[in-house]
Amino acid sequence: MQTLKGFFWIFATVLVIWVLTLLRIFIVDAGIFTMAVGISAVIGIPIVYIYKKVDLSKQWVKYVFLTLICMISAIFATFLSFHAVLIYVLPLLLAVQYRQKRSLWITYFVNNITMTISMLAGFYHGICDLNLLLGSNHTRSWYLEQWSAGALQFDFEPDPVFVILFYGALPRAVILLVFTLILRYISISSHEDAQRIADLTYRKETDLGTHVYNKNKYEEMIENYYPQVHRLAAVFWDVNNLKYVNDKYGHAAGDVLIQTLSSVLYELSTDRRKVYRVGGDEFVMIIENPVDFEIESMVESVSAALLERDGQGEMPISSAAGWAVGCGVDIRKIVNEADTKMYENKIRGKEGRE
């Protein structure tokens, strides 16, 4: 999608420049520019078709997009020649966003091929570079001096194709190679930095023992995010018989109980339902804009999952739950109410067992 957006921004910019050329703002041959825009528009038809009809997650799509963008860049370079030489960089800038380095290198090679073809075609049909035409390497001031003295007489280069390939395409390919290596280095560094940041963020926000969000993330969301949500539900869970299990089987067994409950809650979490460990064996799930019977269904699912696992070992596995619903601005009140109900249900459960 980023490549596709890049293509449309490039084409929109070209259309603006084309309109300004037609209005004679830019002194470029309008007929040549119109031809470049027309051919590029035709090449862009497959891009629109793929966007409408094909699954963009398929691997081959990005290579087709990048190849077509290389072709469009070459079309403009063909007709505008040295005016548009920097356009060869655009496909590389779009390719560097992909994590696979193969995408960047394939784009580099395709770019070189289309660049060479465009230079050859541009020599005969585009706005030609005077030095390539004359096979010389003089500056503008030198030409003006010779023109003023009436001595501007040169022989045309007998083998312009060789000159274009050796003195034009090859240096540009080397420059693009250096540019590609720099982009690749920046891409790798950025990716490594992003991984480090992601790892640090994960460690900062996640309880490493249970892999749900920790108290730090909970407090951040309570303070900055949840008050902005229209309607919320908070569901509190607490492991039953944790002290009994710790005393009889050891604290490692108690950790297993906590991890069992957290894994069940984690499986039920989504972007709309986030789970936080707020105490040793206390977990809270906050649900954004809950639907009818969602909370009851959630509690029943957790109880059923724990009951199923309870039969697989000798340690008793169960939990107490309590919940409350309200507006986001009252999130702390909602959580406290859910905590209170959970504690009341826990007491009733103990009295029932006695």
Image (spheres, helix red, strand yellow):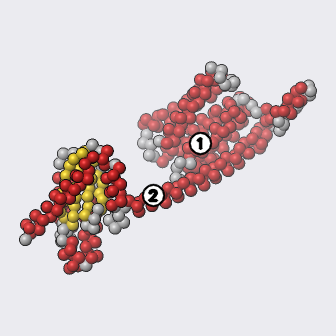
Q: Position of residue 305 (x, y in %)?
A: 21, 62
User: In the image, what residue type sits under mark 2?
Assistant: Ala
Residue corresponding to mark 2: 198
Q: Position of residue 130 (x, y in %)?
A: 79, 32
Which residue is at a point 76% across and 39% down the rendered structure image?
Answer: 164
For discs 2 and 1, the disc positioned in front in the rendered view: 2
Q: Nearer the viewer, residue 307 or 238?
A: 238
Residue corresponding to mark 1: 91
Tell me the quadrant of the picture where the C terminus can be found.
Answer: bottom left
- Mark 2 or 1 closer to N-term? 1
Q: Can the viewer see residue 45?
A: yes
Which residue is at a point 31% across and 44% down the rendered structure image?
Answer: 228
Q: Is residue 69 above or below residue 214?
A: above
Which residue is at a point 89% across and 29% down the rendered structure image?
Answer: 146
Q: Can the viewer see residue 299?
A: no
Q: Nearer the viewer, residue 159 or 176?
A: 176
Whether residue 161 sits left or right of residue 336 in the image: it is right
Which residue is at a point 67% across and 34% down the rendered structure image?
Answer: 84
